[in-house]
Amino acid sequence: MIVALGAALLNVGLLLRGGAGAGNSVALGKVIAFVLILIPGLFLVAQSPAGTFSQNMAPLLPHGFGGIAVAMGFTFIALEGFEVIAAVAGEVKDPASTIPRAMFLSIGVTLSIYLLLLFVMLTIGGPNDGTPAWSDLGQRGDQAVAIAVQRYLGPFGGVVVITAGLLATFSALTSSLLAASRVSYSMARDRALFRPLARLSETETPVNAVLLSGALVCGLVSLTGDVEVAGVTASLIFLLSFALANGAGLLVRVRAGKVGGYQAPLYPLLPLIGVTACVALAVFQTTIKWQASLVALGWLVLGGLLYHFRFRASAERVSAHAEAVNTQLIRLRGRTPLVLVPLANPDRAEALVWLGNALAPRRTGRVLALAVARYDDEQDEAAQGVEAYRRSSQALERAVAASCEVARPFEAVVLLAPDVVKAISRTAREREPEAVLLGMSQLDSEHGTKLLERLLQGTSSDVVVVHSPVDWRPEQVKRILVPVGGETGHDPLRARLLGMFRRYGQDVEVTFLRLLRPDQDRARATSELHDLAADLGYGPAQCELESAEDPAGRLIERSRATDLLILGMGGGRTGDRISPFLLRVAHDAACPLIAIGHPQ
């Protein structure tokens, strides 16, 4: 155990000092050791009597295909390591071509060395009493390779095997630590793990991620008593990981078609075989060492619970912003967001359609325009219904023109209903849009407030309300002020809006503002604000903290120097989603306001 802990600590030191290139000399030494074993062995094989190999290989499958399955499960970890290449893709030039080439070279070299060594061992590594090499060596356990090589190279061969084994184990540990640290770093950068793990040193090394990975390895070494169970658990988790990787590759091709970079051959046969084989081997492993399945299951459950209760909110915020900036992610994830845009005022149609098209990007999302004309078929005349339809069609005509200008398909629904809000809510429930986009000139009026409250209660979709003059256009926005408080349910929606403006206007200036009461903890608020900005790709320079006895008044004052406010709809003291704070800001702000709400 002391040796194992020492090796782990030495690996951590190498990774901290040398980054992704640490351990290259160890890998080179391992290859040299294998060459020293193979070259003399192949020479002796060439001089062995004809038929020696065939005699040692009889019978061909002494334990049937079940024996092959058992061996595959236990030796799967021997071929692991090539996936580490993908873990350091961010540190490689031209990864689209370099990563696949490096993986195939790695697998090719590894298989060549292992198969040649097995060929030599099975040919000249058996005992002199005529017992087949496979039968004798199969009973030798972890000493089989050393005994076989000693038989044709003498004591020198045993020393070389021990050296090669130590170097192989050491390099495998290096690869595992490197992969674990890079995966931890990537997950932390996506806010699926603790933020400090995403910090880089001056040498671009994720120091905290390396230290955590090393600590976990040392802990497992200290607690694990059964090495066989540990090995099967590792193989089981890797098998599941590779099954997921094959499945993800299959989904990418299904959803996005052929994209740039490496394309797996024999599609879709190869990934389907990969998924089936990995899952089958994993299931078989659980029948051999059921303890390993419990360990793997416990580890996965722990990770799932940790993500759900600790990291989900921040990870979804980062994910939403990433989708807004890079719309290809929406397609790769299989999402087809629908934005419902109720239209009433023709002068607002163009701005709302522009925002709708931005929230549901081309080729990945859809925008559904909805015109609801008030008409009661039990009380109104038929002519009144026709006139109501004509009035509603004016906004649709402007929306059609706006969609055609940007070459977007146009979909619309026209409803005649006695209750406009009920009609919008019913359509939202039936169509299940990701967001409902409204335009209102008088959010602060009693009619507008009640309408919005009813809509929020009647839909499970996000709601985006544009409170602005009728002639406002999103293209006019150059400065955005985002007042923030704590973590809220509408954080992903806010992230999408900011990512949308970043995608369409690279020169948009965004400022995150936190208004504090005198009794609030300024240091904690500063940390939370910087974390929020970092999640959305902004730095401390875009963050401001101010103390304010009257937060709404200060926000109204700041609105005179900005082009747009993005404000969340939270519950007020009365429990209403439209708080008095929001109503006051909407009434007195000197710039347009976008209010966002998430269903409770």
Image (spheres, rainbow, N blue to C red):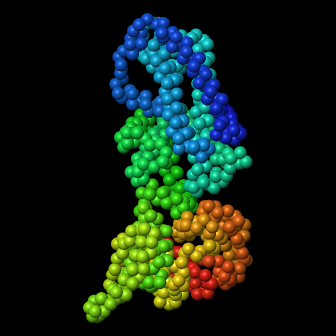
Residue 180 against residue 595 in the figure, above or below = above
Residue 88 horizontal side relative to residue 279, left or right = right
Residue 192 horizontal side relative to residue 65, left or right = right
User: At which x and y percent is residue 428?
Assistant: 39, 74
Residue 169 against residue 507 in the figure, above or below = above
Q: Quadrant of the N terminus?
A: top right
Asked if one can make out residue 234 in the rendered structure from this viewpoint, the answer is no
Instruction: Name the residue located 53 percent from the left edge and 44 percent from the top edge.
Output: 96
Check the image and name the residue furthest to the front. 405
User: At which x and y percent is residue 92?
Assistant: 60, 42
Image quadrant assignment for residue 275: top left
User: At which x and y percent is residue 39?
Assistant: 55, 15
In the foreground, 407 or 464: 407
Instruction: Name the residue located 49 percent from the left edge and 29 percent from the top edge.
Output: 108
Residue 102 against residue 388 in the figure, above or below = above
In the foreground, 564 or 573: 564
Instruction: Name the residue located 54 percent from the left edge and 87 percent from the top edge.
Output: 444
Image quadrant assignment for residue 31: top right
Residue 538 horizontal side relative to residue 334, left or right = right
Instruction: Name the residue located 44 percent from the left edge and 85 percent from the top edge.
Output: 345
Residue 61 against residue 388 in the figure, above or below = above
Image quadrant assignment for residue 311: bottom right
User: At which x and y percent is residue 350?
Assistant: 47, 78
- Label count reads 0
Asked if one can make out residue 66 in the rendered structure from this viewpoint, the answer is yes
